[in-house]
Image (cartoon, helix red, strand yellow):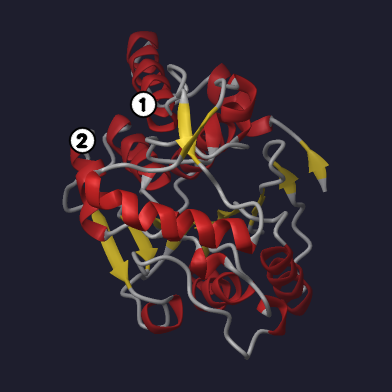
Amino acid sequence: MTLSHEGVKKVLANPADDAADGDEGASIDRYLDILKHSLTRAVGSEKYRPLGPVNPWRQAAVQTVNGLLRRVNLEVVKRLPFDPEAREHGLDRPTEAETMIGLRRLENIRFCVEDVLRRSVPGDLIETGVWRGGACIFMRAVLKAHGVVDRTVWLADSFQGLPKPDPRYAQDAGDMHHTALELSVSRSQVEDNFRRYGLLDEQVKFLVGWFADTLPGAPIERLAVLRLDGDMYGSTIEALDNLYDKLSTGGYVIVDDYTLKGCRAAIDDFRRDRGISDELVVIDRSGAVYWKKT
């Protein structure tokens, strides 16, 4: 596994090979650059952020207090200076942003989507685990910027947070993601986020429910980009088991949570069992990775 900014460099150097002229390419550049900074709120500082969990005891206390304060539209927050480097690498959790993955991982999405378009790799785009929808909003924006009307962006999520650990997956034993209320974002809120950017249309489709229930029968014929953001072993392996065979050769798998124990184990187990040797490329300091299916 190597550290590379190949995707970032290619996008910045020549983001629109298929553009009719330089002005069109520059317009696409400006649109997507402004959008990624807006989606991450990297355009300005956020002085206050929710008081995130450090241990289960503090998390329980914060959730209890916030439950009472929400009745009067208040919340426990922490005052922090804005760190542009952390926002670039997605190392903080923005208060209002539509995504927490940072600028580098949005640039990676752009690279992967534009590359499959350039090479005519067939298939739709999907993210499994969408939070507030920012990464999928950006996927839809890339398609719109290039005038693509025959591909769909799929959003797979429970829209009620993460599941409790499944006894079938020993690697998830003790996982506490299901207690993180801030990870529960409703479908209606995600749809509102799409509308804010004028990107909610017939090319955006939702798969609502736990992955074990929705992905086996998902009406998806082919995929060109498969982005995994399920945090846990079960969520990750279920997405791979049900979707990887639909990924076209030459398409991309993006793994947002490779540094998390459960997710990493699922990726490593799946690649080993399938005999996948395609190189894992590191995207940013968060440890997110991607590979091209060969």
For this rendering, which residue is in front, 273 or 151? 273
Q: Which residue is mark 2?
A: 196
Q: Label 1 crowding class (10 Å Cα cut-off): few <14, some 14-19, many 20+?
A: some
| Residue 122 seen by the camera | no
| Amino acid type, residue under disc 1 in the picture | Leu
Query: As displayed, is residue 4 above or below residue 65?
Result: above
Residue drawn at point x = 49 percent, y = 72 percent: 243
Mark 1 or 2: the one toward you? 2
For this rendering, which residue is in front, 137 or 110? 137
Judged left or right of residue 66, residue 14 is right
| Amino acid type, residue under disc 2 in the picture | Arg
Q: Name the outermost residue toward the bottom.
A: 168
Q: Name the outermost residue toward the right.
A: 1
x then y, percent, for residue 290: 65, 50
x then y, percent, for residue 286: 69, 42
For this rendering, which residue is in front, 198 or 182? 182
Q: Which residue is mark 1?
A: 35
Q: Name the outermost residue toward the top.
A: 23
Q: Label 2 crowding class (10 Å Cα cut-off): few <14, some 14-19, many 20+?
A: few
Query: As displayed, is residue 260 above or below residue 262?
Result: above
Residue drawn at point x = 63 percent, y = 90 percent: 168
Judged left or right of residue 281, residue 23 is left
Of label 1 and label 2, which has the lower sequence position?
Answer: 1
x then y, percent, for residue 148: 28, 41
Q: Secondary structure at mark 1?
A: helix
Q: Secondary structure at mark 2?
A: helix
Residue drawn at point x = 37 percent, y = 35 percent: 96
x then y, percent, for residue 112: 53, 42
